[in-house]
Image (tube, grey):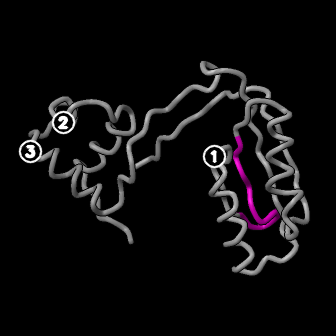
């Protein structure tokens, strides 16, 4: 369901994507609206599912070794039931940060964050090698992250 957004909604969303930790008064000042209006708009956007959650972004380099892998997965059988089953499997895995069904090409593309290559090997064995419906796995390992953005253009 698409939600109709006006200019104020867009300013609020852009400001929150930049820094969701600001107070309602700071947000209101930034977007040139009254605090009660801002509070009502944020609640409406949250209730409508436009704002799904607010999180802290952590730079993995500051918490220890990290290896990012982009993984292409092709299933042997691509029926809806098999795809939903695979999605449920990867949704349970904390090291899988993102999972996309894609077309054409592989069936899924995953973004995976692990501590090191042995951790990736264990994950790959658990999710891919032990799963009877996985036909092909192709992994790419990041050597340098030049851009990381969570911002959605509104």
Query: How far apart are the two marked residues, 1 and 2, measured between alpha carbons?
Result: 32 Å
Whichever of callouts 1 and 2 sits on the residue coming sooner in the sequence is 2
Q: Which mark is residue 71?
A: none
Whichever of callouts 3 and 1 sits on the residue coming sooner in the sequence is 3
Disc 3 and disc 2 in contact, CB within 8 angstroms:
no
Q: Is residue 120 above or below residue 137?
A: above
Query: How far apart are the two marked residues, 3 and 2, measured between alpha carbons?
Result: 9 Å
Secondary element at image label 3: helix
Tell me the quarter of the picture where residue 105 sits. bottom right
| Left or right: 21 as drawn, with respect to 37 | right
Instruction: Look at mark 3 in the image and give the residue it sits on.
Output: 36
Instruction: Look at mark 1 in the image and give the residue it sits on.
Output: 94
Q: Position of residue 116 (x, y in %)?
A: 80, 30
Q: Nearer the viewer, residue 56 or 118?
A: 118
Instruction: Look at mark 2 in the image and give the residue it sits on.
Output: 24
**Magenta stretch, residue numbers:** 102-112
Q: Position of residue 102 (x, y in %)?
A: 71, 64
The residue drawn where x is 32% and y is 65% is 3
Q: Is residue 123 above or below residue 59?
A: below
The residue drawn where x is 11% and y is 39% is 35
Q: Is residue 88 highlighted in magenta? A: no
Q: Nearer the viewer, residue 147 or 39?
A: 39
The residue drawn where x is 49% and y is 32% is 57
- Quadrant location, the N terminus: bottom left
Q: Nearer the viewer, residue 61 or 14?
A: 61
């Amino acid at each position: 369901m698409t939600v109709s957004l006006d200019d104020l909604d867009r300013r609020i969303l852009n400001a929150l994507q930049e820094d969701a930790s600001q107070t309602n008064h700071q947000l209101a000042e930034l977007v040139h609206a009254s605090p009660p209006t801002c509070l009502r708009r944020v609640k409406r956007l949250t209730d409508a599912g436009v704002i799904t959650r607010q999180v802290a972004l952590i730079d993995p380099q500051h918490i220890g070794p990290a290896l990012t892998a982009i993984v292409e997965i092709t299933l042997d059988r691509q029926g809806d039931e098999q795809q939903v089953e695979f999605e449920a499997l990867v949704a349970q895995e904390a090291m899988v940060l993102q999972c996309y069904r894609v077309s054409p090409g592989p069936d899924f593309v995953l973004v995976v964050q692990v501590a090191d290559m042995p951790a990736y090997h264990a994950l790959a064995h658990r999710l891919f090698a032990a799963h009877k419906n996985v036909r092909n796995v192709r992994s790419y390992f990041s050597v340098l992250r030049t851009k990381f953005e969570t911002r959605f253009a509104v």
